[in-house]
Image (spheres, grey):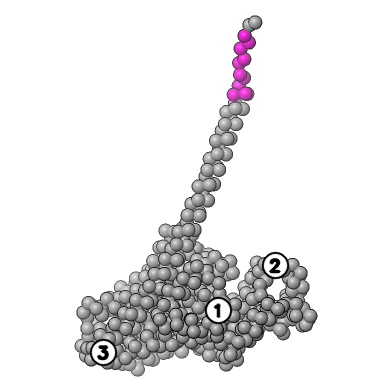
Amino acid sequence: MSKVKVVPNDENLQGGHNSRKRSTASLIRIQSSRLHREITQSIKRNKKLLAKAELYFTAFLSITDMISDIVMAVRYYQSNRLPYALASMICVGTNLVLQSILVFMSHPIGSQVKEQAILWSLLKPGIDAHRVASKAETEEAAAVDARSEMTGARVIEVVAESIPGTIIQAMAMFSTSGGDTSLTPVLSLSSSILTSAFISAQLSHEWDASEDQRKQEPGFYGYLPESMKRRLFALFNLLLMAAFNLIIRTASLVIISQKSVYTAFAVYGGELALFFLVKKARGDFTSWVPVSGLSSVIVSFMMRLLLKVAVDWLCCAQFRHPQEVGGIYWSFTILVTCAIGIASALAHGDSTVTIIMGVSCAVLLVAFALFLASIEREYVATFFDTRTASEYNVDRFFNATSDERKFDALAMNENLWRDIRNDVKDWLASSLPAYLEEEPPWLTDYHRSIIPEWAVDDKALLSRIRNENVEELLQERRGSVANLIGALPNA
């Protein structure tokens, strides 16, 4: 039998070649997709590690800064500089007392002993950091979540202790009656400046990097880039801004106070007064905190004062929020800082001081410009936002991408959505029956508990909303410390 030689034609060869090319291309796509997922997951892990490391490091700085302030108070006492010693201890004591009030307001009565013990043992910064980093569950009857409580504690710390401590140490160091520029006070002053600046940058990063916050308010949170290199550069500029802002303000206050204490009060007090006048004139005085009556006035005043001081001295980016200082006023404050700095240096009359102040102001403005250039472009406008808290909350309600997000409006102070009460009432009337039938996962007992009684005319529907668990939660809230002073009107 003769052998038959099979000669492949060109079409078969070409078909096999194309098949191999498609298989290779498909394999490359699969490997590329897998590599992309691994890189993405690695970046997310690194970001989470960075956020946790910042939390714990900030807690460490907070504790060491308080110890440093106590050490300096003892040093002032031993060197017979009693006014500085007394002022330092008053700052430490004020910080602890205000944080004690925060704990008193935030936690139910049954947790007070434990929470107060954590505070007065100076362990609160570390415990707060652990709770936020581990996403520990918030007590159901607590007035605020762990991140909000930590933010409140940090703001109190920088406003009541870190910033005043920096001012006291600077005044003691450059006192006209014999300053002390030895190593210990210089290190302590540097520590206070860096600690305050780091707390400011870390707070902004903590809130912006939160996945929950980016889902709840995508138009405000998300300005920090996904790229780790760009994110670190943005955070470095935030840190630089906070540090030089504090240096300029502190130096200016020392210079002005040496000439006239009354002038210092007029300049810095006038700046605060202008802020409150603008807020009042725009109908934007009321804070977002869900309180009513006299409590609303007191809490709003304290919130506005504390956050304005934090922005004035540390330009904390988190508080550019329309419900806080506001974007345009936040940016305006940076210009005011430079104006006060240059004016005080010129009034001092020393050319060296003027040059140093001019360079410091230039560094602050350049850092601000670089920061804006390094963040996501669509969020630059949030640093110049002119909306009031009420306008922002109304926009959130009507632009919400889901009903869950609409519920965020109900968690705010009622004054922030008083202009759309009827819209909220109509929305609840049309949506609640379907919610109760479908029972979506996000409709938790907490969401049910914040629905005000006046918003639901159907009493049968209201009774279905406030089931046994919700009533139990409301009962716990009625017994909480916050409610005892009228801070939970919906309960």
Q: Earlier in the sequence, mark 3 or mark 2?
A: 3
Residue under pointer 1:
144
Res. 440 mark:
2
Label 3: element kind: helix
**The image quarter in which residue 478 lies:** bottom right
Q: Which residue is found at the position 63% from the left and 10% from the top?
A: 4
Q: Amino acid at mark 3?
A: Tyr
Q: Earlier in the sequence, mark 1 or mark 3?
A: 3
Q: Is mark 3 in CB contact (under 8 Å) with mark 2?
A: no
Q: Is residue 126 visible?
A: yes
Residue closer to the observer: 417 or 263:
417
Left or right: residue 317 versus residue 404 is: left
Q: How many marks?
A: 3
In the rendering, at what x and y percent does residue 270 appear?
Answer: 42, 89
Label 3, residues with CA under 10 Å away: few <14, some 14-19, many ≥20 = some
Q: Which residues are magenta?
A: 3-13
Q: Amino acid at mark 2?
A: Pro
Label 2: element kind: loop
Residue under pointer 3:
77
The span from disc 2 to disc 1 (Cα, nearest Å) is 23 Å
Residue 4 covered by magenta stretch:
yes
In the rendering, at what x and y percent does residue 368 appear?
Answer: 41, 70
Residue 34 covered by magenta stretch:
no
